[in-house]
Every structure is written in C-alpha cells, then in structure tokens.
Image: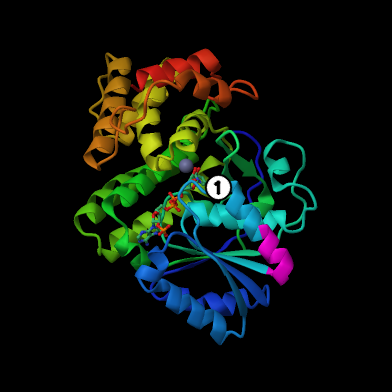
Amino acid sequence: MENFTFVNETKIIFGKDTENQVGMETVKYGKRVLLHYGGGSIKKYGLYDKILKSLKGAGLEIIELGGVQPNPVLSLAKKGIDICRKEKVDFILAVGGGSVIDSAKIIAVGVPYSGDVWDFYIGKAVPEKILPVGVVLTIPASGSESSTSAVITNEKGLYKKGLESGLLRPNFAILNPEITYTLPPYQTACGATDMMAHIMERYFTAVKNVDLTDRLCEGALKTVINNVSIVLKEPENYNARAELMWAGAIAHNNLLGTGRIGDWASHKIEMEISGVYDLAHGAGLAIILPVWMKYVYKKDVERFAQFAVRVMDQEPDFYDMEKTALKGIDRLKEFFKGIGMPVTLKEADIPYDRLEEMASKCTESGPVGNFVKLDKDDILAILEMAK
Ligand code: NZQ
Ligand code: ZN
C-alpha cells in the first residue's frame, strides 16, 4: 500500500426534503449568492422554486446564471466570473449535475484570480484561493459534489480538460434521492457508468497489498450494478435511488483510492470524445472501458480475473485465469449494453475521421495512464478497437 493523506471536507446532507436546508447552510458562508444551474430541468420539476424559497428565507441576495450545458464550456464560466465580480458575489451555489458543479467551481476559483482562469488548466498557474461553493445535486454521476476536480471544455480547439486541487471540494453538498426520480433512463445509466468508471480507474492499479480498498471497490461496484438495474425499472424506488446517489459520491471522493495509484487513461481518452462530439461522459466511458481492459489486461491477468469473479459473478476457471479475465470483460460490456449504453463508437454515431487527432491531443503532455502507460499509438489502437 502507498502512503496517503485523506481529507474530505465536504459536508454531505443526505435524504428526503434536505434541499430545504440550502438557505440555512449557505448563510454560514455568504450573503450574495450566484445561483448556477443548467438547461431547465430544475424549473421543470419544481426544485428551483424550493431553492429560491429557502435562500430568500435565510435573507440571502440571489444573482442567477442558468444555461450550463452538459459538457460545460469555458465561455459561460467566464461570464459567471464577470457577473460575480460586478455583483460582489461571495458564494456560488450549483444546483444540478457534474456540468453545473464544475462550471460553479471554475467560477469560484476564477473570481479571486487576476489572470485567465484557463491558466490553471494549462499549468500556467495553481489555484490559491476560491470562493465557497455549495451543491444541490440532481444527478448522481460525476462525483463532483465532493471531488477535487473541475472539468471544462475550452471551445477554442475543443480542449476538454480537468483541474485538480484540494480547494475544489465543495463546502457542502445536499443529496436528496427523490430529486433524481425525474432522470431519463439514459442519464441514469450514463451516471451509473461514470460511477463505475471512477471506481474501476482506482481498482486497476499496479500497487500491491490493497485488499481493504479492493473489497470496498468491489462492494461499491456491485451496489451500482444491482441498483441501476432496479431504478431503470422503478424510477421512483427511493431506496435504490438512494444507494446510487450515495455510491456516486463515494466512488469519487477518493476514499476508494487511498493507498493506491489509479489509472485514469480511460477518462483521458473519453474526454477527447466528449470534448469534440459532445457525447455524454458516461456513454463515452461505456465504449472505452471494456476496450481499454482488453488492451491492458495482460499486465495483471490475476487482477482482471478477480474483477471477473468478485464483481461480474463469473465462474472462475482455475486452469485458465486468462479465460476468466476475458469473460469478465465481456460480461461488463454486456452489462453496459443491457442498461442502454453504446459500446462502440459506431453505436454512438462517432465518425472515425478524427481518431488520430484525438490520440494526439490525449497524449500532448506525455503518455497517459498509470496501470499501463499508453502513448499516442496505444490510444489510437484503443480507439480503432472501439469502432
Ligand atoms: O441541464 P438540465 O436541464 O438540468 O438537464 C440535465 C442534463 O441535460 C439532466 N438532468 C440533471 N438532473 C436531472 C436532469 N434531468 C431530469 N431530472 C434531473 N433530476 O441531465 C443531463 C446531464 O447533466 P450533467 O450535469 O451533464 O451530467 P453529469 O453529472 O454526468 O456531469 C457530466 C460532466 O461532469 C464531468 C464530465 O466530464 C461532464 O462534463 N465530470 C466531472 C468530474 C468531477 N468534477 O469530479 C469527474 C467526472 O469523471 C466527469 O469527468
Ligand atoms: Zn467520470
């Protein structure tokens, strides 16, 4: 096991009606709030009114910025930064999913910085200050509600990149599973796939002697697999929605990564796809993960066989571990198909004419992945296998 320091300062407020506490929580940090949200689902399903009531009830001034799109863009975050400076905003409240939360984090880190916020993404600057951020989560998926990352697409060049900093963990996150009842099946499945990817990126590690976190990862993966299947049939099953919502946060708050070195190549490859083609992140991961697994499994056949047996319920073939490992990958692919995810680029209508460009951009700063280091040719091979 590797040395580690684990801190997760995000206060999680979980359960029915908890969104009504948002005013009470926010008032601990600020007076003038930027209410940041997406394309309208919060208005359509009544959450917006509840949030306004709670914020106003706590005596807060509200400035609004909606319109965050899935795969959020830098230009809107920059607009948010300008608004916050002009209006002297001292708190950012994200009501939505990963896209809204990430946009809110970028605004929060951009306001106190005198340069261009993109500097943080290209290694020209490191965040030192941030405005406080709160979250009311509407889709369990990205884990951004308690993660240290913020992902954004710069429309100039369609660069989709992530920023990592301990400062980016929100101060609080409100998680009411009932709010997720209105999620369309496709978004529910994309969310579950993303959570699984966050766990698997950590699970496939070259670090030895990580039994506790192996077992936590396996338990979390099985929880997601079991409960996504339930909610796709019963969208208003509170307990299954609750399991998924909590799993989404646990999957990416890095508890499951303690003592390990995660891989993250599948995420890097996927971000090239969703950055250029605006595909839902989870759908892109369903295409890439099984292909990545087939490309690298020989590095540690035993670990892949363990995944097959403990997570995908594959009968072990004690005489042929490799067969067991490969069957586990096939089962995972079938599972993704079963929940309505695309598993090839073709199924997601991604054309093949920019694969080389994506492989180049993906490896611009050097090889990606830690379980196995992958260079441009490897990434291109994986994208070719994903056709
Ligand atoms: O925009 P609205 O109208 O709200 O609709 C959204 C959006 O269309 C809809 N939705 C959300 N909650 C709903 C709902 N519809 C009905 N009922 C509800 N309760 O769902 C759609 C997708 O929302 P989005 O926020 O894009 O989804 P997600 O949470 O999957 O976020 C994806 C983004 O997060 C990034 C991804 O790359 C992508 O840009 N990630 C962020 C991470 C982080 N910061 O730690 C880690 C992840 O690996 C990921 O990269
Ligand atoms: Zn992800």
Residue 270 percent across, percent down from the top left: 46, 33
Q: How many marks?
A: 1
Judge from the rendering whether residue 170 lies leftward or rightward of residue 383; answer left or right: right
Secondary structure mostly taken by the magenta-highlighted segment of the chain: helix
Q: Nearer the viewer, residue 290 or 69?
A: 69
| Type of amino acid under label 1 | Val
Judge from the rendering whether residue 386 lies leftward or rightward of residue 272; answer left or right: left
Residue 84 percent across, percent down from the top left: 68, 65
Judge from the rendering whether residue 341 lies leftward or rightward of residue 160; answer left or right: left
Extreme right residue here? Answer: 114
**Residue at image coords 61%, 85%:** 59
Residue range (magenta): 81-90
Q: Nearer the viewer, residue 72 or 225?
A: 72
Above or below, comparing residue 62 to residue 305 in the picture: below
Tell me, yes or no, whether the highlighted magenta stretch contains residue 88. Answer: yes
Above or below, comparing residue 287 to residue 126 in the picture: above
Quarter of the image where the C terminus is located: top left
**Residue at image coords 28%, 14%:** 320
Please say whether residue 326 is visible from this viewpoint. yes
**Crowding at mark 1 (Cα within 10 Å: few <14, some 14-19, many 20+):** many
Above or below, comparing residue 188 to residue 84 in the picture: above
**Residue at image coords 37%, 26%:** 351
Quarter of the image where the N terminus is located: top right
Tell me, yes or no, whether the highlighted magenta stretch contains residue 256. Answer: no
Q: Which residue is mark 1?
A: 73
Q: Nearer the viewer, residue 315 or 149?
A: 149
**Residue at image coords 29%, 48%:** 186
Residue 277 percent across, percent down from the top left: 43, 35
